[in-house]
Amino acid sequence: MNCSGYERKMSDYLDGQLSKATEDELRFHLNGCPRCRLKIDDMESSIQAVKSLPAVSPQPGFDHRLGNLLNLEIARELYAASWWRRVSGAFAELGEHSRQRPVQLVFATSLILTITVIGGFWELSAPTGRSESSPSPPMAFSLPTPVEPELAPPDPISPFPLERELAPYMAVKPALSQEQASILPTSSASSLSLNASGITGNRPGIMTVRTMEPKTHGIRFVSAGTGMRLDPSLFSESFGRGLDTSGNIDQPTTEERLQPVGTTEFRATQRAYGLPGSPDTQGSSGPTTPLRRVRISF
Amino acid sequence: MADNTYINAVQVSDIESGVLDELTLSDEALFIRVQREDARAFEVIVGRYRTRLYNCIYRMVHNMECAEDLVQETFLRVYRNRHNYKAISNLSTWIYTIALNLARSELRKRKRRQFFSLNASPHENSTREGIDLPDKNAGPGDHLEQNELGRAIQHAIDQLPEKYKSVIVLRDIEELSYEQIGEILHCPTGTVKSRVNRGRLRLQEMLRQWQVEIL
């Protein structure tokens, strides 16, 4: 072995990592090689110098800062615990006690109660008066809220004005026929919008929607900003000729401007009272002025 | 008699509260408590390792603020990954592995920044053979070295390539075994020995040059 070979062993020699034979061999070489002797002495002194470096401690406040970080981490973990982990943990905990009869009884009772309650809600939410031939969902009536005081019904006891009283302001005459029914869409994607051009002031208008058959169906009433639209979803009957079918419920102005106020079913003959309405634009296809308020009674 | 009673009472209360347990338990046993969400056990772990880790990382990165950030990040990662730790391995090896990985990443980032800052001004220092970059990160910790020799040693460590720097710090400053260093750096013990030898030879050369310059 030459000097470079012994040089590679110097570190192990100083650390006491060499075998006895190799150590003796290196020591013998060092005795006869002043260059390697000098090198290993330098290495030893440099190691001692590195080891003599003072230990550096963290600055004051380190523990406080680290504590804050750890508290944040703990809080993050608490909030980040997944729903599934909590549920599985709860079930695991339940499983540990599941051999106890009271726990089993409580669990079984709560399970039965939960299923019963869910089933009850399901039954309540299911439509009852829907026609068998119409698989569509029940209609929703959406009235604008809040109702302005001047538009409120004059008589709270009898909120629906007589048709004859409002006859001058009727937007739609109840003149419906079987042939008109065919021009009206039956798709839920269609809508009817009330033409209200020529309206003066706040004169009340009335729209009467009359079905041809005493058959259950629905109508959805939505408000698009200052205007109103009628959406004859599931419409199997016809409306009067004063109604314009140019509207499209699939393209409402904005969804957030729609103000649903209730859901019910539309039976037999219904009336929709609108304020203001106009009888002048029945069936027109010209520019439309949206209605501001429409009240529906049934 | 009264003193003995007091001492006995203190010892009993310590045993009951687990203080003595925490002080005498091994790192691994303590960490099992940490895995069972014992915050006090983690405080003891932090107390045991904070200075060692800080010293080790400071010698690697030679910047106090950076070292503090890295030590904090190390403890955060230890806590975050506490459930991944298997008791079959040495806890100190695991913690040092995390700390060294962070320190080495920091050194590589600095190297990249140096590289791009050099590329940004290619004509500067172009007449010089070796580019002596001012070490902006060396400033805050220089007062820690009490003498010229200390500054020279730290400067020599800074000049070492990262693979030699790691083993020199772990071996000569932290005084870890070759086997433990091999586990921390994920390399065989023979490689560690070889790197330690070469690192020491380089250090020795640099310190000899420094001695020649001051004489």
Image (cartoon, coloured by chain):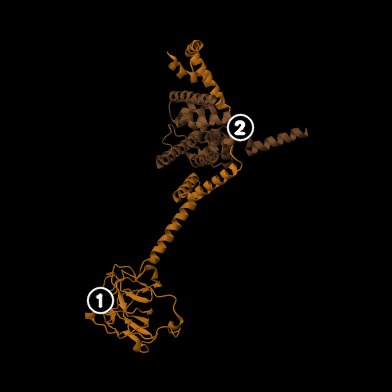
Q: Nearer the viewer, residue A143 or B160?
A: B160
Q: Counting other residues with Cα less than 10 Å from the Cα at mark 2, is it few (<14), some (14-19), or many (20 or more)?
A: few
Left or right of B99? Residue B120 is: left
Q: Position of residue B140 (x, y in %)?
A: 56, 39
Which tag is nearer the camera, tag 1 or tag 2? 2
Q: Secondary structure at mark 2?
A: loop
**What chain is colored brown?**
B
Q: Nearer the viewer, residue A115 or A270?
A: A270
Asked if one can make out residue B88 in the rendered structure from this viewpoint, the answer is no
| Pointer 2 residue | B146
| Pointer 1 residue | A184
Q: Position of residue A68 (x, y in %)?
A: 56, 46
Q: Position of residue B149 (x, y in %)?
A: 57, 28
* Marks 1, 2 in one chain: no
Mark 2 belongs to which subunit?
Answer: B
| Occupied quadrant, residue A176 | bottom left
Q: Secondary structure at mark 1?
A: loop
**What chain is colored orange?**
A
**Against A203, is B125 above or below?**
above
Q: Nearer the viewer, residue B16 or B82?
A: B82
**Against B205, is B2 above or below?**
below
> Callout 1, which amino acid?
Leu
Q: CA distance from mark 1 to mark 2?
A: 96 Å
**Against A117, is B123 above or below?**
above
